[in-house]
Amino acid sequence: MANAMDDSIYELLKIEQQAEQIVLDGEKERENIKQKALDDANASIDQFNNRLPELRQSFLDKANERAEQSIAELKLRYNERNQELRKLASEHEQEALDVALSTLLVDERDNASGQ
């Protein structure tokens, strides 16, 4: 009976050692998974940081393109408006000269009659 009890205790100790080994293996595996996740996250961060200059340049290129397009549109509108104003000035040039001449003649006549 002592032998059977010794065998049982031996079996329990053996099972306990196996359980401890399973726990240790699980903890090791957990640490490996955790380290791999950290490595992957750091690799993603590095990859993102390495792409920042490219992303920045792309953003600047698009901003410059939009600015150049806006400038071109403003120049076009300015030129169109300038042409309209020149046309209006040309159309009213004779009228303006007539009014100016009439005003000068009236002033001259008033000055001549006032003397």
Image: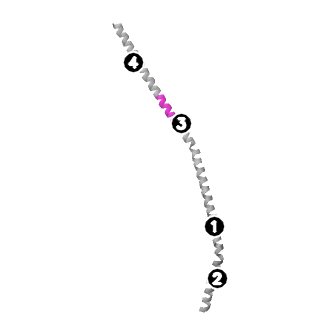
- Residue at x 63% of width, y 67% of height: 82
Name the amino acid, label 1.
Asn
Q: Earlier in the sequence, mark 4 or mark 3?
A: 4
Q: Earlier in the sequence, mark 2 or mark 3?
A: 3
**Location of residue 92 (image quadrant):** bottom right
Specify few, some or many for label 2: CA neighbours under 10 Å numbering under 14, 14-19, or 20 or more: few
- Residue at x 65% of width, y 70% of height: 87
Looking at the rendered structure, which numbered label has been put on residue 101? Answer: 2
* Mark 1 lies on residue: 82
Marks 2 and 1: CB-CB under 8 Å?
Answer: no
Marks 4 and 2: CB-CB under 8 Å?
Answer: no
Real-space CA distance between mark 4 and mark 2, rounded to the nearest whole angstrom: 120 Å
* Mark 3 lies on residue: 43
Q: Secondary structure at mark 4?
A: helix
Q: Earlier in the sequence, mark 1 or mark 4?
A: 4
Marks 1 and 4: CB-CB under 8 Å?
Answer: no
Real-space CA distance between mark 2 and mark 1, rounded to the nearest whole angstrom: 27 Å
